[in-house]
Amino acid sequence: MNTFSLISGTVVCSTLLVACGGSDSSNTSLTEDTSTESDTVSTDVGPDISLFLSDGLAEEISTEDCTLSDGTNTTCYRITVAGVPANTDIGPFCPRYITDDETAGGIWFDGSGELYSLSGEFIENISDIYGDDWLLYDPATGEVNVTDTQTACEAAARPNVDEAYQNHCVECDIAYYNGGVSQTFLIPTTPSRLANPDSAQNNIGVTLNGVLLAGPAPVDAILSANTIAAFDDCGGHVNPADGYHYHAATGCSEVVTEVDGHANLMGYALDGYGIYGMLDAAGEESYDLDECRGHEDDTRGYHYHTASAAENMFIGCFSGAQAN
Ligand SMILES: [Zn+2]
Ligand SMILES: [Zn+2]
Protein backbone atom coordinates (compact mmCIF):
# COMPACT_ATOMS: atom_id res chain seq x y z
CA MET A 1 0.00 0.00 0.00
CA ASN A 2 2.10 2.76 0.98
CA THR A 3 5.40 3.52 -0.27
CA PHE A 4 7.95 2.69 2.14
CA SER A 5 9.67 5.17 3.83
CA LEU A 6 12.38 7.08 2.52
CA ILE A 7 10.90 7.28 -0.81
CA SER A 8 7.52 8.58 -0.60
CA GLY A 9 6.67 11.86 0.80
CA THR A 10 9.06 13.72 -1.30
CA VAL A 11 8.97 12.21 -4.66
CA VAL A 12 6.13 14.08 -6.09
CA CYS A 13 7.36 17.51 -5.82
CA SER A 14 10.94 16.99 -6.22
CA THR A 15 10.78 15.28 -9.45
CA LEU A 16 8.48 17.72 -11.05
CA LEU A 17 9.76 20.32 -9.22
CA VAL A 18 8.11 23.35 -9.65
CA ALA A 19 6.62 23.92 -6.60
CA CYS A 20 5.78 26.87 -4.99
CA GLY A 21 4.46 29.91 -4.24
CA GLY A 22 2.32 32.63 -3.67
CA SER A 23 1.88 36.00 -4.77
CA ASP A 24 0.11 39.12 -4.55
CA SER A 25 1.85 42.07 -4.41
CA SER A 26 1.34 44.03 -1.46
CA ASN A 27 4.44 45.30 0.01
CA THR A 28 4.69 45.92 3.56
CA SER A 29 4.13 49.40 4.31
CA LEU A 30 7.59 50.42 5.25
CA THR A 31 8.58 51.59 1.86
CA GLU A 32 5.71 53.53 0.56
CA ASP A 33 3.74 54.80 3.33
CA THR A 34 1.91 57.45 1.56
CA SER A 35 -0.31 55.20 -0.36
CA THR A 36 -3.87 54.74 0.46
CA GLU A 37 -5.48 52.15 2.44
CA SER A 38 -6.01 49.90 -0.42
CA ASP A 39 -2.59 48.69 -0.15
CA THR A 40 -2.66 48.39 3.44
CA VAL A 41 -0.46 46.65 5.61
CA SER A 42 -0.26 43.75 3.81
CA THR A 43 0.50 40.72 5.47
CA ASP A 44 2.35 39.42 2.53
CA VAL A 45 6.01 39.69 3.13
CA GLY A 46 7.99 37.73 0.58
CA PRO A 47 11.17 35.77 1.20
CA ASP A 48 14.33 37.63 2.13
CA ILE A 49 16.76 35.72 -0.04
CA SER A 50 19.77 37.39 1.54
CA LEU A 51 19.21 35.16 4.55
CA PHE A 52 20.05 31.91 2.75
CA LEU A 53 23.49 30.56 3.62
CA SER A 54 25.45 30.56 0.39
CA ASP A 55 27.17 27.28 1.18
CA GLY A 56 23.80 25.53 0.95
CA LEU A 57 23.11 26.84 -2.57
CA ALA A 58 24.30 25.32 -5.83
CA GLU A 59 23.80 28.57 -7.69
CA GLU A 60 22.89 32.14 -6.98
CA ILE A 61 19.17 32.74 -6.44
CA SER A 62 17.54 34.35 -9.48
CA THR A 63 14.11 35.77 -10.25
CA GLU A 64 11.82 34.73 -13.11
CA ASP A 65 8.22 35.04 -14.23
CA CYS A 66 5.88 32.40 -12.91
CA THR A 67 2.21 31.57 -12.58
CA LEU A 68 0.73 30.41 -9.32
CA SER A 69 -1.91 27.79 -8.66
CA ASP A 70 -4.53 30.50 -8.19
CA GLY A 71 -3.79 31.98 -11.60
CA THR A 72 -1.69 34.87 -10.37
CA ASN A 73 1.03 35.91 -12.78
CA THR A 74 3.96 37.10 -10.76
CA THR A 75 7.64 36.54 -10.21
CA CYS A 76 9.31 33.71 -8.34
CA TYR A 77 12.72 33.13 -6.88
CA ARG A 78 14.55 30.18 -8.36
CA ILE A 79 16.36 28.60 -5.44
CA THR A 80 18.68 25.70 -6.19
CA VAL A 81 20.14 23.96 -3.18
CA ALA A 82 23.31 21.94 -3.25
CA GLY A 83 21.80 19.04 -1.31
CA VAL A 84 24.01 19.31 1.74
CA PRO A 85 23.21 21.53 4.73
CA ALA A 86 25.45 24.59 4.89
CA ASN A 87 26.01 24.51 8.62
CA THR A 88 25.87 20.94 9.93
CA ASP A 89 27.18 17.47 9.21
CA ILE A 90 24.79 14.73 8.08
CA GLY A 91 24.14 11.85 10.52
CA PRO A 92 24.64 9.79 12.54
CA PHE A 93 21.42 7.82 12.08
CA CYS A 94 21.41 4.24 13.43
CA PRO A 95 23.51 3.10 16.39
CA ARG A 96 25.73 0.07 15.63
CA TYR A 97 25.50 -1.85 18.90
CA ILE A 98 22.86 -2.07 21.58
CA THR A 99 25.52 -0.88 24.00
CA ASP A 100 25.96 2.41 22.09
CA ASP A 101 24.79 5.54 23.84
CA GLU A 102 22.57 8.14 22.25
CA THR A 103 25.44 10.03 20.65
CA ALA A 104 25.89 7.09 18.24
CA GLY A 105 22.46 7.57 16.68
CA GLY A 106 19.96 10.26 15.76
CA ILE A 107 16.26 10.42 16.56
CA TRP A 108 13.05 8.62 15.69
CA PHE A 109 9.42 9.73 15.75
CA ASP A 110 6.29 8.10 14.44
CA GLY A 111 3.86 10.97 14.69
CA SER A 112 2.29 9.68 17.88
CA GLY A 113 3.75 12.50 19.93
CA GLU A 114 6.86 10.74 21.20
CA LEU A 115 10.36 11.77 20.22
CA TYR A 116 12.88 9.00 20.77
CA SER A 117 16.65 9.19 20.97
CA LEU A 118 18.19 6.43 18.85
CA SER A 119 20.46 4.83 21.41
CA GLY A 120 21.40 1.18 21.52
CA GLU A 121 19.03 0.84 24.43
CA PHE A 122 16.13 2.10 22.33
CA ILE A 123 16.92 -0.51 19.67
CA GLU A 124 17.20 -3.23 22.29
CA ASN A 125 13.80 -2.43 23.76
CA ILE A 126 11.89 -1.47 20.63
CA SER A 127 9.61 -4.50 20.93
CA ASP A 128 8.14 -2.85 24.02
CA ILE A 129 6.81 -0.13 21.75
CA TYR A 130 6.00 -1.88 18.49
CA GLY A 131 5.47 -5.53 19.38
CA ASP A 132 7.06 -8.89 19.90
CA ASP A 133 7.86 -9.48 16.25
CA TRP A 134 10.39 -6.66 16.38
CA LEU A 135 14.06 -7.55 16.75
CA LEU A 136 16.48 -5.06 15.23
CA TYR A 137 19.73 -6.62 16.44
CA ASP A 138 21.59 -9.90 16.69
CA PRO A 139 21.03 -11.25 20.20
CA ALA A 140 24.31 -13.16 20.04
CA THR A 141 26.51 -10.16 19.33
CA GLY A 142 24.42 -7.13 20.16
CA GLU A 143 25.05 -5.78 16.67
CA VAL A 144 22.22 -3.65 15.26
CA ASN A 145 20.76 -4.59 11.86
CA VAL A 146 21.62 -1.53 9.79
CA THR A 147 21.26 -1.07 6.04
CA ASP A 148 24.88 -0.17 5.66
CA THR A 149 25.36 -0.61 1.91
CA GLN A 150 23.72 1.16 -1.02
CA THR A 151 22.03 -2.07 -2.06
CA ALA A 152 20.58 -2.57 1.39
CA CYS A 153 19.40 1.01 1.79
CA GLU A 154 17.65 0.99 -1.55
CA ALA A 155 16.04 -2.39 -0.94
CA ALA A 156 14.68 -1.08 2.35
CA ALA A 157 13.66 2.35 1.11
CA ARG A 158 11.22 1.18 -1.51
CA PRO A 159 7.51 0.51 -1.39
CA ASN A 160 7.77 -3.20 -0.74
CA VAL A 161 10.63 -3.64 1.58
CA ASP A 162 12.79 -6.59 0.65
CA GLU A 163 12.19 -9.21 3.28
CA ALA A 164 15.87 -9.47 3.92
CA TYR A 165 15.77 -5.93 5.29
CA GLN A 166 12.76 -6.16 7.53
CA ASN A 167 13.71 -5.72 11.16
CA HIS A 168 16.38 -3.22 10.23
CA CYS A 169 17.30 0.27 11.18
CA VAL A 170 17.34 1.93 7.76
CA GLU A 171 19.86 4.54 6.73
CA CYS A 172 21.36 5.65 3.42
CA ASP A 173 24.73 7.34 3.11
CA ILE A 174 24.75 10.62 1.18
CA ALA A 175 27.97 9.40 -0.44
CA TYR A 176 25.86 7.00 -2.55
CA TYR A 177 24.27 10.01 -4.21
CA ASN A 178 27.20 12.10 -5.29
CA GLY A 179 27.46 13.65 -1.87
CA GLY A 180 24.11 15.45 -2.26
CA VAL A 181 21.09 15.77 -4.54
CA SER A 182 20.64 19.26 -5.92
CA GLN A 183 17.04 20.46 -6.18
CA THR A 184 15.38 23.60 -7.46
CA PHE A 185 12.42 25.38 -5.88
CA LEU A 186 10.34 28.18 -7.37
CA ILE A 187 8.98 30.34 -4.60
CA PRO A 188 6.81 33.44 -5.14
CA THR A 189 8.56 36.71 -4.42
CA THR A 190 5.31 37.88 -2.88
CA PRO A 191 2.85 35.39 -1.40
CA SER A 192 -0.74 35.15 -2.67
CA ARG A 193 -3.23 34.19 0.00
CA LEU A 194 -5.67 31.45 -0.96
CA ALA A 195 -9.34 31.51 -0.05
CA ASN A 196 -9.05 27.86 0.97
CA PRO A 197 -5.77 26.33 2.09
CA ASP A 198 -4.01 23.62 0.11
CA SER A 199 -3.00 20.34 1.65
CA ALA A 200 0.58 19.93 2.79
CA GLN A 201 1.32 16.26 2.19
CA ASN A 202 4.17 16.67 -0.28
CA ASN A 203 7.13 19.00 -0.26
CA ILE A 204 6.73 21.88 2.16
CA GLY A 205 9.59 24.27 1.57
CA VAL A 206 13.30 24.93 1.84
CA THR A 207 15.45 25.95 4.77
CA LEU A 208 17.94 28.79 5.04
CA ASN A 209 20.73 26.23 5.32
CA GLY A 210 19.72 24.63 2.02
CA VAL A 211 17.63 21.58 2.88
CA LEU A 212 14.28 20.38 1.53
CA LEU A 213 11.45 20.41 4.06
CA ALA A 214 9.60 17.23 3.09
CA GLY A 215 6.02 16.24 3.82
CA PRO A 216 5.31 13.83 6.66
CA ALA A 217 7.42 10.66 6.64
CA PRO A 218 5.19 7.65 5.79
CA VAL A 219 5.70 6.08 9.17
CA ASP A 220 2.84 3.60 8.90
CA ALA A 221 4.44 2.01 5.87
CA ILE A 222 7.84 2.12 7.47
CA LEU A 223 6.67 0.48 10.66
CA SER A 224 4.65 -2.15 8.81
CA ALA A 225 7.93 -3.58 7.51
CA ASN A 226 9.40 -3.67 11.01
CA THR A 227 11.83 -0.93 10.11
CA ILE A 228 12.57 2.53 11.32
CA ALA A 229 13.88 5.12 8.88
CA ALA A 230 16.30 6.79 11.23
CA PHE A 231 16.68 10.57 11.32
CA ASP A 232 19.76 12.42 12.46
CA ASP A 233 19.58 14.90 15.31
CA CYS A 234 18.57 17.62 12.85
CA GLY A 235 15.47 15.64 11.80
CA GLY A 236 16.88 14.67 8.38
CA HIS A 237 17.72 11.50 6.52
CA VAL A 238 18.74 10.44 3.02
CA ASN A 239 16.81 8.70 0.27
CA PRO A 240 17.76 7.98 -3.33
CA ALA A 241 15.30 10.46 -4.85
CA ASP A 242 15.76 13.50 -2.67
CA GLY A 243 19.07 12.96 -1.01
CA TYR A 244 19.18 14.61 2.39
CA HIS A 245 15.88 16.13 3.51
CA TYR A 246 14.14 17.10 6.74
CA HIS A 247 10.98 15.63 8.28
CA ALA A 248 11.29 17.54 11.54
CA ALA A 249 12.61 20.82 12.86
CA THR A 250 15.05 20.58 15.74
CA GLY A 251 16.67 23.98 15.38
CA CYS A 252 19.47 23.22 12.90
CA SER A 253 18.05 25.51 10.25
CA GLU A 254 17.28 28.45 12.52
CA VAL A 255 20.17 30.55 11.33
CA VAL A 256 18.61 33.97 11.88
CA THR A 257 17.89 35.31 15.34
CA GLU A 258 14.86 37.53 15.62
CA VAL A 259 15.57 40.63 17.64
CA ASP A 260 12.17 40.93 19.27
CA GLY A 261 12.01 37.59 21.03
CA HIS A 262 9.84 36.00 18.34
CA ALA A 263 10.80 32.46 17.26
CA ASN A 264 13.62 32.31 14.72
CA LEU A 265 13.19 32.03 10.97
CA MET A 266 14.17 28.60 9.64
CA GLY A 267 13.14 28.76 6.00
CA TYR A 268 10.33 29.43 3.55
CA ALA A 269 7.30 27.42 2.56
CA LEU A 270 6.67 26.85 -1.14
CA ASP A 271 3.97 29.53 -1.01
CA GLY A 272 6.54 32.14 -0.03
CA TYR A 273 5.57 32.55 3.60
CA GLY A 274 8.26 32.25 6.25
CA ILE A 275 8.45 29.23 8.54
CA TYR A 276 9.68 29.95 12.06
CA GLY A 277 10.60 27.74 14.96
CA MET A 278 7.85 26.47 17.22
CA LEU A 279 8.85 28.36 20.34
CA ASP A 280 9.73 31.98 20.97
CA ALA A 281 12.74 33.16 22.97
CA ALA A 282 10.81 32.64 26.19
CA GLY A 283 10.02 29.05 25.25
CA GLU A 284 6.37 29.74 24.53
CA GLU A 285 4.30 28.53 21.60
CA SER A 286 1.96 30.98 19.84
CA TYR A 287 -1.59 30.49 20.95
CA ASP A 288 -3.33 31.94 17.92
CA LEU A 289 -2.18 29.71 15.08
CA ASP A 290 -4.65 28.79 12.35
CA GLU A 291 -5.11 25.29 10.92
CA CYS A 292 -2.01 25.73 8.78
CA ARG A 293 -0.02 26.74 11.87
CA GLY A 294 0.12 30.33 10.65
CA HIS A 295 -0.66 33.74 12.08
CA GLU A 296 0.47 37.28 11.46
CA ASP A 297 2.15 40.16 13.17
CA ASP A 298 3.18 43.65 12.14
CA THR A 299 6.83 42.79 11.63
CA ARG A 300 6.61 39.54 9.73
CA GLY A 301 3.16 39.62 8.17
CA TYR A 302 1.57 36.20 7.78
CA HIS A 303 3.95 33.34 8.63
CA TYR A 304 4.03 29.79 9.96
CA HIS A 305 5.41 28.20 13.09
CA THR A 306 6.67 24.65 12.68
CA ALA A 307 5.15 21.79 14.63
CA SER A 308 7.28 19.79 17.06
CA ALA A 309 9.48 16.98 15.76
CA ALA A 310 7.29 14.42 17.49
CA GLU A 311 4.36 15.42 15.27
CA ASN A 312 6.07 14.35 12.01
CA MET A 313 5.12 17.56 10.21
CA PHE A 314 6.06 21.20 9.77
CA ILE A 315 2.87 23.03 8.82
CA GLY A 316 -0.75 21.93 8.65
CA CYS A 317 -1.53 23.28 5.19
CA PHE A 318 -0.55 25.98 2.69
CA SER A 319 -2.30 29.29 3.16
CA GLY A 320 -0.81 30.67 -0.04
CA ALA A 321 -0.62 29.59 -3.68
CA GLN A 322 2.37 27.69 -4.98
CA ALA A 323 3.97 28.08 -8.39
CA ASN A 324 2.53 25.78 -11.01
ZN1 LIG B 1 12.25 11.00 4.12
ZN1 LIG C 1 4.80 34.24 14.83
Image (tube, rainbow, N blue to C red):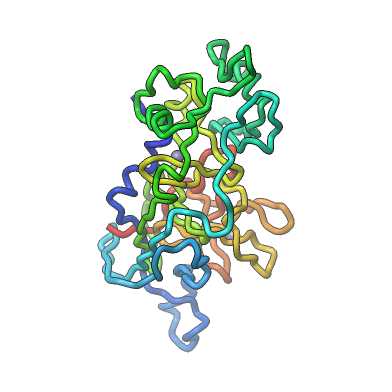
The residue at the point 58 percent across, 58 percent down is 87
- Residue farthest right in this picture: 282
Instruction: Where is residue 154? Give x, y as percent.
Output: 38, 32
Instruction: Where is residue 246? Give x, y as percent.
Output: 50, 46
In the displayed structure, does residue 241 sit left or right of residue 33? Answer: left
In the displayed structure, does residue 149 sit left or right of residue 138? Answer: left
The residue at the point 34 percent across, 72 percent down is 63
In the rendered view, tell whether residue 133 sits above or below residue 82: above
Q: Quadrant of the N terminus?
A: top left
The residue at the point 46 percent across, 42 percent down is 238
Q: Quadrant of the C terminus?
A: bottom left
Q: Nearer the viewer, residue 142 or 83?
A: 142
The residue at the point 63 percent across, 53 percent down is 286
Q: Classify the position of ligand 2 by quadrant: top left, top right, bottom left or bottom right.
A: bottom right
In the rendered view, tell whether residue 268 sits above or below residue 108: below
In the rendered view, tell whether residue 275 sits above or below residue 35: above
Q: Nearer the viewer, residue 97 or 133?
A: 97
Q: Nearer the viewer, residue 204 or 295?
A: 204
